[in-house]
Image: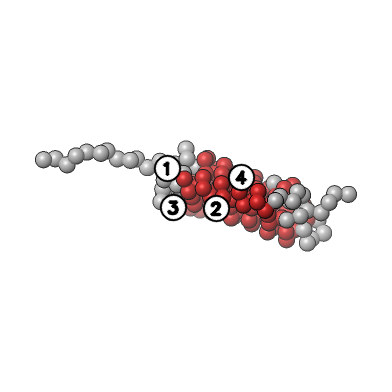
Amino acid sequence: MRPPPRYPVRAGLLTGAIAAAANALLSLPLRSPHDALFNSASVTLAALAVGLAGGLLWSFALMRSDPAKVYALLLAALAACLFALAIAGEALLERSAAFGLPLAGVSVVGAAVVPRASRYAAPLLLVGAALAGALALGAAMAGVGDAPSGRLDLPPR
Protein backbone atom coordinates (compact mmCIF):
# COMPACT_ATOMS: atom_id res chain seq x y z
CA MET A 1 0.00 0.00 0.00
CA ARG A 2 1.26 3.45 -0.95
CA PRO A 3 1.71 6.11 1.71
CA PRO A 4 -0.93 8.84 1.53
CA PRO A 5 0.03 12.02 -0.32
CA ARG A 6 1.33 14.77 1.91
CA TYR A 7 1.47 18.49 1.44
CA PRO A 8 -0.44 18.86 -1.85
CA VAL A 9 -0.28 22.66 -1.82
CA ARG A 10 3.45 22.58 -1.16
CA ALA A 11 3.83 20.20 -4.11
CA GLY A 12 1.72 22.51 -6.26
CA LEU A 13 3.92 25.48 -5.40
CA LEU A 14 7.09 23.49 -6.11
CA THR A 15 5.91 22.20 -9.49
CA GLY A 16 4.45 25.64 -10.23
CA ALA A 17 7.83 27.24 -9.54
CA ILE A 18 9.53 24.83 -11.94
CA ALA A 19 6.90 25.52 -14.61
CA ALA A 20 7.20 29.26 -13.93
CA ALA A 21 10.96 29.22 -14.54
CA ALA A 22 10.42 27.25 -17.75
CA ASN A 23 7.71 29.69 -18.86
CA ALA A 24 9.85 32.72 -18.08
CA LEU A 25 12.51 31.40 -20.45
CA LEU A 26 10.02 30.09 -23.02
CA SER A 27 8.27 33.46 -23.22
CA LEU A 28 11.44 35.23 -24.41
CA PRO A 29 11.42 34.01 -28.04
CA LEU A 30 7.61 34.30 -28.31
CA ARG A 31 6.10 37.53 -29.66
CA SER A 32 4.14 39.06 -26.83
CA PRO A 33 0.82 40.68 -27.73
CA HIS A 34 1.60 43.51 -25.29
CA ASP A 35 5.07 43.79 -23.75
CA ALA A 36 3.92 45.77 -20.72
CA LEU A 37 1.22 43.25 -19.77
CA PHE A 38 2.61 39.96 -21.03
CA ASN A 39 6.24 39.80 -19.95
CA SER A 40 8.29 37.25 -18.04
CA ALA A 41 7.14 38.58 -14.68
CA SER A 42 3.43 38.20 -15.43
CA VAL A 43 4.02 34.82 -17.08
CA THR A 44 5.87 33.68 -13.94
CA LEU A 45 3.06 34.80 -11.66
CA ALA A 46 0.46 33.08 -13.85
CA ALA A 47 2.39 29.79 -13.82
CA LEU A 48 2.73 29.99 -10.04
CA ALA A 49 -1.03 30.56 -9.78
CA VAL A 50 -1.67 27.47 -11.92
CA GLY A 51 0.69 25.45 -9.71
CA LEU A 52 -1.09 26.67 -6.58
CA ALA A 53 -4.44 25.82 -8.19
CA GLY A 54 -3.08 22.35 -8.97
CA GLY A 55 -2.14 21.85 -5.33
CA LEU A 56 -5.54 23.04 -4.13
CA LEU A 57 -7.36 20.87 -6.66
CA TRP A 58 -5.33 17.83 -5.61
CA SER A 59 -6.10 18.59 -1.98
CA PHE A 60 -9.80 18.71 -2.89
CA ALA A 61 -9.55 15.51 -4.96
CA LEU A 62 -7.98 13.64 -2.05
CA MET A 63 -11.26 13.99 -0.16
CA ARG A 64 -13.10 12.00 -2.85
CA SER A 65 -13.37 8.25 -3.35
CA ASP A 66 -11.31 8.20 -6.59
CA PRO A 67 -8.86 11.10 -6.25
CA ALA A 68 -6.85 10.41 -9.42
CA LYS A 69 -9.94 10.45 -11.61
CA VAL A 70 -11.36 13.55 -9.90
CA TYR A 71 -8.03 15.37 -10.26
CA ALA A 72 -7.74 14.42 -13.93
CA LEU A 73 -11.21 15.84 -14.58
CA LEU A 74 -10.51 19.01 -12.60
CA LEU A 75 -7.17 19.50 -14.32
CA ALA A 76 -8.78 18.98 -17.72
CA ALA A 77 -11.35 21.64 -16.85
CA LEU A 78 -8.59 24.00 -15.72
CA ALA A 79 -6.65 23.36 -18.93
CA ALA A 80 -9.76 23.98 -21.04
CA CYS A 81 -10.32 27.29 -19.24
CA LEU A 82 -6.72 28.38 -19.75
CA PHE A 83 -6.73 27.43 -23.43
CA ALA A 84 -10.11 29.11 -23.99
CA LEU A 85 -8.83 32.26 -22.27
CA ALA A 86 -5.76 32.35 -24.53
CA ILE A 87 -7.87 31.86 -27.65
CA ALA A 88 -10.54 34.36 -26.55
CA GLY A 89 -7.81 36.92 -25.92
CA GLU A 90 -7.17 36.93 -29.65
CA ALA A 91 -10.30 39.09 -30.03
CA LEU A 92 -8.68 41.79 -27.90
CA LEU A 93 -4.98 41.40 -28.58
CA GLU A 94 -3.41 40.03 -31.72
CA ARG A 95 -1.04 37.08 -31.18
CA SER A 96 -2.39 36.31 -27.70
CA ALA A 97 -3.22 32.71 -28.67
CA ALA A 98 0.22 32.08 -30.15
CA PHE A 99 1.76 33.52 -27.01
CA GLY A 100 -0.54 32.04 -24.38
CA LEU A 101 -1.20 28.50 -25.59
CA PRO A 102 2.37 27.16 -25.23
CA LEU A 103 2.76 28.83 -21.85
CA ALA A 104 -0.57 27.46 -20.63
CA GLY A 105 0.48 24.01 -21.84
CA VAL A 106 3.69 24.11 -19.82
CA SER A 107 1.77 25.29 -16.75
CA VAL A 108 -0.78 22.48 -17.07
CA VAL A 109 1.98 19.89 -17.46
CA GLY A 110 3.53 21.27 -14.27
CA ALA A 111 0.20 20.96 -12.48
CA ALA A 112 -0.19 17.40 -13.77
CA VAL A 113 2.89 16.39 -11.77
CA VAL A 114 1.38 17.56 -8.46
CA PRO A 115 -0.03 14.15 -7.41
CA ARG A 116 3.38 12.50 -7.86
CA ALA A 117 5.23 15.36 -6.19
CA SER A 118 2.90 15.35 -3.19
CA ARG A 119 4.02 11.83 -2.29
CA TYR A 120 7.28 13.30 -1.05
CA ALA A 121 7.41 15.80 1.78
CA ALA A 122 9.36 18.56 0.06
CA PRO A 123 11.14 20.65 2.68
CA LEU A 124 9.64 24.09 3.11
CA LEU A 125 13.07 25.59 2.50
CA LEU A 126 13.27 23.88 -0.91
CA VAL A 127 9.82 25.15 -1.88
CA GLY A 128 10.73 28.66 -0.73
CA ALA A 129 13.99 28.58 -2.67
CA ALA A 130 12.22 27.37 -5.81
CA LEU A 131 9.62 30.13 -5.47
CA ALA A 132 12.29 32.77 -4.89
CA GLY A 133 14.31 31.53 -7.85
CA ALA A 134 11.31 31.53 -10.18
CA LEU A 135 10.24 35.01 -9.07
CA ALA A 136 13.79 36.34 -9.42
CA LEU A 137 14.13 34.86 -12.90
CA GLY A 138 10.76 36.26 -13.96
CA ALA A 139 11.61 39.72 -12.61
CA ALA A 140 15.08 39.71 -14.18
CA MET A 141 13.71 38.78 -17.60
CA ALA A 142 10.72 41.15 -17.44
CA GLY A 143 12.55 43.91 -19.28
CA VAL A 144 13.60 41.63 -22.10
CA GLY A 145 10.96 41.94 -24.78
CA ASP A 146 10.43 41.65 -28.48
CA ALA A 147 9.44 45.28 -29.07
CA PRO A 148 11.78 47.15 -31.38
CA SER A 149 14.13 49.32 -29.43
CA GLY A 150 14.00 52.12 -31.99
CA ARG A 151 16.82 54.07 -33.45
CA LEU A 152 18.94 56.36 -31.40
CA ASP A 153 19.46 59.59 -33.32
CA LEU A 154 20.68 62.96 -32.33
CA PRO A 155 18.21 65.74 -33.00
CA PRO A 156 18.89 67.78 -36.16
CA ARG A 157 20.70 71.10 -35.72
Report the residue that reaches farthest toward the left. 157
**Which residue type does callout 1 highlight?**
Val
Disc 4 on helix, strand or loop?
Answer: helix
Disc 2 on helix, strand or loop?
Answer: helix
N-term-proximal mark, 4 vs 1? 4
Residue 7 pos. (x, y %): 73, 56
N-term-proximal mark, 2 vs 3? 3
Q: Residues within 10 Å of mark 4 (few under 14, many from 20)?
A: many
- To which residue does mark 1 refer? 144
- To which residue does mark 2 refer? 46
Work out how far the residue at label 3 is from the one at label 4, CA to CA, in angstroms. 22 Å
Residue 141 pos. (x, y %): 46, 44
Q: Which mark is residue 37?
A: 3
Residue 37 pos. (x, y %): 44, 52
Residue 42 in sight in this render: yes
Point 72% across, 48% down: residue: 117
Foreground residue among 36 and 14: 14
**Which residue type does callout 3 highlight?**
Leu
Work out how far the residue at label 2 is from the one at label 3, CA to CA, in angstroms. 12 Å
Residue 145 in the figure: left or right of residue 54: left
**Which residue type does callout 4 highlight?**
Ile
Point 25% across, 39% down: residue: 152
Foreground residue among 76 and 3: 3
Point 47% across, 40% down: residue: 28
- To which residue does mark 4 refer? 18
Foreground residue among 62 and 97: 62
N-term-proximal mark, 3 vs 1? 3
Q: Indicate how the structure is coloured in the image.
A: secondary structure
Work out how far the residue at label 3 is from the one at label 1, CA to CA, in angstroms. 13 Å
